[in-house]
């Protein structure tokens, strides 16, 4: 071997060793982009159709509404650079930023917003969240086929001006315009391909990131959207969304440096993660509950529902299963929402509606329903979506009902998309459920049980309840509104339409070097300005 050849070989070996060293460093420190586990495979990424938190987390990176929420849940200008509101609170005029574009370079226009909102309301479209646009003039009438789309109170005056007319003054309407149901969709793309939101090539958004790959039930890959109006603030070149319903898989990925953040750590790991400084527990405006299908025997008997609810030891579930500093839910609406008087809390004013683990009353009610000690009561099925914690809660409640009431309960788990469909169709007896507020007002919890609501999975129908909700929506007088909503909540609890278990907290495992993101108590996580330190 010549000296020249030996020198060349030495250089090659040096480069190979350097590459291995750099590769080893990379595996230890992780890539320079964020990897986040959000839970289940999204049911859909069409913002007009989705209802779940995994979907809304992904959509918050791909889309942007007229407004966005800051860290204190205050609406800030987003697609709209400014707006004007009429003195009577009924007419809004939004002015879009100049030059805003979709991720494919097409302009985002006021006509896209008008198209999106009206198709969401369309009776044929079947959006479960269509009622979030009933605040628009004739929105509900159009959804029920009583008028035409051109009578709905949203109209593009030109490319950059959107006029909105409401049925009644709505104090939280600006916040609603940040919600995913009110995101725009690209009309040209959607009309050309009804399945536009199912494939990365056609899923066009207007948010800080755009989608490049979607491996179903595994991961969604996002990259920085250079067409985004505020792209200069987007620090991450890439964002990987990991999809898994297994908390054991998620914690293994976190410990092996395969993800930087996860929303589904096993509760048994909380003490360790907290000691390591890698656990965050934050406020979360939501309630975990069981939904009773009030049209299915024997759940059509309110005393059976009341007995089942009172026979749950909620504190035991928090202490032994979920372990995330949650609070026992003895009502429906969670704490953290202002009542009529500034500084007051709706939950504090409303108080509790029953006692936790009231076993003797539960037994008495079941006997009054005709099933003393559970005798004669047919087996009941409780369904839940596949997840370790939901399974553990279901098993704990199953045992409580068996031991206390003599009730035989079968458990069945379903994959997320199947589960959502089963629950929305009312093809169940009892179902695990959870609800996170869409905006900061008690109405976001109470109007879901109106007759005909797309999220009224319990199939509840109560004319008095509907009247109270309509009253609370029809006035700007906060005392009248809150009184009506308190009465509606009492009806819901007296009828035992649901069995609330606990008020959520948001428990997240996150590495200390993840910075710049912010989380809303409404469940949204914004990674626009996130970075790795």
Image (tube, rainbow, N blue to C red):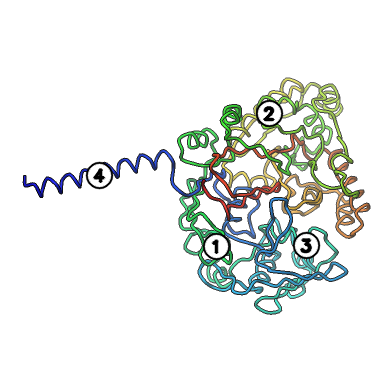
Q: Is residue 129 above or below residue 405?
A: below
Q: Nearer the viewer, residue 142 or 248?
A: 248
Give me the disc on residue 409: 2
Residue 422: x %, y % from top left: 64, 45
Q: Residue at x 76, y 47 (%)?
A: 459
Residue 227: x %, y % from top left: 53, 67
Q: Badge 2 local density, few (<14 within 10 Å), some, or many (20+)?
A: some
Q: CA distance from mark 3 to mark 1?
A: 36 Å
Give me the disc on residue 16: 4
Q: Nearer the viewer, residue 159 or 95?
A: 95
Q: CA distance from mark 1 to mark 4?
A: 37 Å
Which label's residue is closer to the chain start, 1 or 4? 4
Give me the disc on residue 134: 3
Mark 2 falls on what kind of element? strand
Which label's residue is closer to the chain start, 3 or 1? 3
Q: Is residue 513 above or below residue 117?
A: above
Left or right: residue 478 compared with residue 319: right
Which label's residue is closer to the chain start, 4 or 2? 4
Q: Nearer the viewer, residue 367 or 393?
A: 393
Q: CA distance from mark 2 to mark 3?
A: 39 Å
Which label's residue is closer to the chain start, 2 or 1? 1
Tell which tag, 2 or 3, sits nearer the viewer. 3
Q: Is residue 83 above or below residue 325?
A: below
Q: Are marks 1 and 4 in contact (CB under 8 Å)?
A: no
Q: CA distance from mark 2 to mark 1?
A: 55 Å
Disc 1 target residue: 232
Q: Residue at x 73, y 48 (%)?
A: 437
């Amino acid at each position: 071997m010549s000296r020249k050849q030996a020198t060349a070989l030495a250089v090659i070996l040096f480069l190979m060793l350097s590459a291995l060293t750099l590769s080893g460093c990379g595996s230890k420190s992780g890539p320079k982009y964020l990897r986040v586990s959000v839970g289940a495979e999204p049911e859909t990424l069409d913002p007009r159709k989705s209802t779940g938190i995994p979907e809304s987390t992904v959509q918050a990176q791909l889309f942007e509404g007229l407004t966005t929420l800051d860290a204190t849940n205050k609406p800030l200008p987003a697609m709209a650079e400014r707006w004007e509101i009429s003195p009577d609170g009924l007419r809004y005029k939004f002015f879009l930023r100049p030059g805003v574009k979709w991720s494919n370079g097409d302009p985002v226009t006021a006509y896209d917003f008008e198209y999106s909102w009206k198709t969401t309301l369309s009776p044929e479209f079947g959006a479960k969240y269509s009622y979030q646009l009933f605040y628009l003039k004739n929105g509900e009438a159009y959804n029920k086929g009583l008028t035409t789309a051109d009578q709905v109170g949203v109209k593009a005056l030109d490319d950059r001006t959107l006029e909105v007319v409401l049925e009644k003054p709505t104090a939280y309407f600006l916040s609603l315009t940040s919600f995913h149901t009110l995101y725009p969709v690209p009309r040209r793309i959607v009309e050309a391909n009804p399945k536009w939101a199912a494939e990365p090539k056609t899923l066009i958004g207007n948010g800080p990131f755009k989608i490049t790959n979607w491996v179903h039930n595994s991961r969604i890959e996002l990259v920085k959207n250079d067409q985004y109006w505020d792209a200069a603030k987007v620090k991450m070149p890439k964002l990987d969304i990991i999809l898994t319903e297994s908390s054991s898989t998620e914690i293994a990925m976190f410990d092996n440096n395969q993800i930087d953040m996860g929303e589904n750590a096993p509760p048994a790991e909380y003490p360790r993660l907290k000691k390591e400084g890698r656990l965050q527990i934050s406020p979360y405006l939501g309630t975990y509950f069981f939904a009773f299908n009030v049209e299915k025997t024997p759940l059509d008997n309110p005393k059976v529902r009341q007995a089942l609810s009172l026979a749950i030891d909620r504190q035991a579930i928090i202490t032994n299963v979920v372990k995330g500093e949650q609070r026992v839910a003895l009502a429906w609406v969670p704490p953290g929402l202002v009542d009529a008087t500034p500084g007051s809390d709706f939950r504090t004013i409303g108080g509790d509606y029953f006692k936790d683990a009231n076993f003797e009353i539960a037994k008495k009610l079941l006997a009054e329903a005709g099933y003393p000690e559970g005798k004669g009561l047919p087996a009941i099925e409780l369904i839940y979506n596949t997840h370790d914690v939901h399974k553990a809660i279901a098993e704990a409640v199953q045992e409580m009902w068996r031991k206390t009431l003599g009730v035989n309960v079968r458990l069945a788990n379903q994959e997320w998309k199947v589960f959502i469909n089963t629950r929305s169709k009312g093809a169940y007896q009892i179902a695990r459920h959870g609800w996170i507020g869409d905006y900061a007002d008690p109405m976001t919890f109470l109007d879901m049980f109106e007759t005909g609501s797309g999220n009224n999975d319990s199939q509840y129908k109560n004319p008095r309840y509907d009247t109270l909700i309509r009253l609370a929506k029809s006035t700007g007088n906060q005392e009248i509104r809150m009184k009506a909503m308190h009465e509606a909540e009492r009806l819901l609890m007296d009828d035992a339409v649901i069995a609330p278990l606990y008020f959520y907290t948001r428990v997240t495992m996150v590495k200390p070097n993840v910075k710049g993101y912010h989380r809303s108590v409404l469940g949204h996580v914004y990674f626009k300005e996130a970075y790795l330190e």
